[in-house]
Amino acid sequence: MTITPVKMVIDTDPGVDDAMAILYVAHMPEIELLGLTSVFGNVSVEKATRNALRLVEDAGLNVPVAGGAAGPLARDAQPHSYHVHGAEGFGDIPAQTPKGRALDEDAADFLIRMAREHAGELVVCAIGPITNLAEAINRDAGFAKNVKRIVFMGGAAFVPGNVTPHAEANTFNDPHALNVVLQSGAPVTMVGLDVTMQILLDGDDFAALERANPNHGGFLNRASAFYLEFYRQVVGVAGCGLHDPAAVIACHRPDLFESRSVAIRVIEEGEEIGRTLPVDEGAPMVEVLTGGDMDGVKNLFLRAFGPATATA
Ligand code: BDR
Ligand code: CA
């Protein structure tokens, strides 16, 4: 059976788990990556653009990178997550200057152009604060109709947040942008902490990735040490959530997940800012992933880097 690849743009703030998601795509012929757009979040937008360029070069992905938003639409800018992802975004791995440069076109214009050129086919997978997508919707009334689906990593509908008791990091960073996206009328899937914290990767998993693929798996094994230490010390969990890779996997393997259609209101101010609150009515409906074949998702991710090899 011939599988038609999913046409995808990834909007990203790399970031250790962003790197996991993008390197997964490099090994997944079921996804046709059309480009990356960068956004502030885990790191500054300058570092996010640089890291995105480095990832496409290291992965041998011949796709453009468009630089995006440096801060949120309306709220006060929050500190970047260097304590989670390391000073340059990839744990203790030093910064590396990429060979290429970003497009002159910015992220929102690139997203608008891709959605027009691939109308009805483009899936936008947002794995950072969703500011660039809100900007695309604000600039182009046709954007929401042109995209096939927006799949975003963010939010926590039925579980606690990870930066506050109420909010997940991406939605905390730009709640207004998520409301713009939800109200746009585009079909939206939320890959929040409800599902991503059900899939944990530990040090043994990353070591296996390195054995399977010394180049990309080795990079992720090195980058993840700092990230895993954050999870161990601060979150109290012996593994990291498969946040951003789960969002990418949900784009091409939705059959692995269970979901509920939920009306979601994003809280824009006060103590609960960034909360993705399920309400009875009066808010846009979102497909919220709640669980599924979590071992299947994890194995799909790990196996993408090569066959499992015996412990060294
Ligand atoms: C999300 O926040 C970022 O730190 C990660 O890259 C992921 O996109 C998890 O809450
Ligand atoms: Ca991210």
Image (cartoon, rainbow, N blue to C red):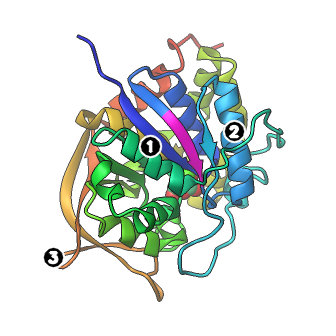
Label 3 neighbourhood size at 10 Å, few (<14), some (14-19), many (20+)? few
Mark positioned earlier in the residue sequence (1 or 3): 1
User: Of residues 182 and 288, which is closer to you in this image?
Assistant: 182
Residue 185 in view here: yes
Whole-percent x, y for residue 258 in the image: 22, 45
Examine the structure image and report whether residue 9 is included in the region drawn in magenta: no
Quarter of the image with the N terminus is top left
Local secondary structure at mark 2: helix
Residue under pointer 2:
53
Q: Which residues are magenta?
A: 34-38
Q: Residue at x 45, y 73 (%)?
A: 175
- Residue 212 occupies which quadrant of the picture? top right
Against 187, is 135 above or below?
below
Residue under pointer 1:
114
Amino acid type of disc 3? Asp
Local secondary structure at mark 1: helix
User: Of residues 293 and 243, which is closer to you in this image?
Assistant: 243
Mark 1 to mark 3 CA distance (whole Å): 35 Å
Amino acid type of disc 1? Met
- Residue 280 occupies which quadrant of the picture? bottom left
Quarter of the image with the C terminus is top right
Amino acid type of disc 2? Leu
Whole-percent x, y for residue 116 in the image: 38, 46
Mark positioned earlier in the residue sequence (1 or 2): 2
Mark 3 to mark 2 CA distance (whole Å): 43 Å
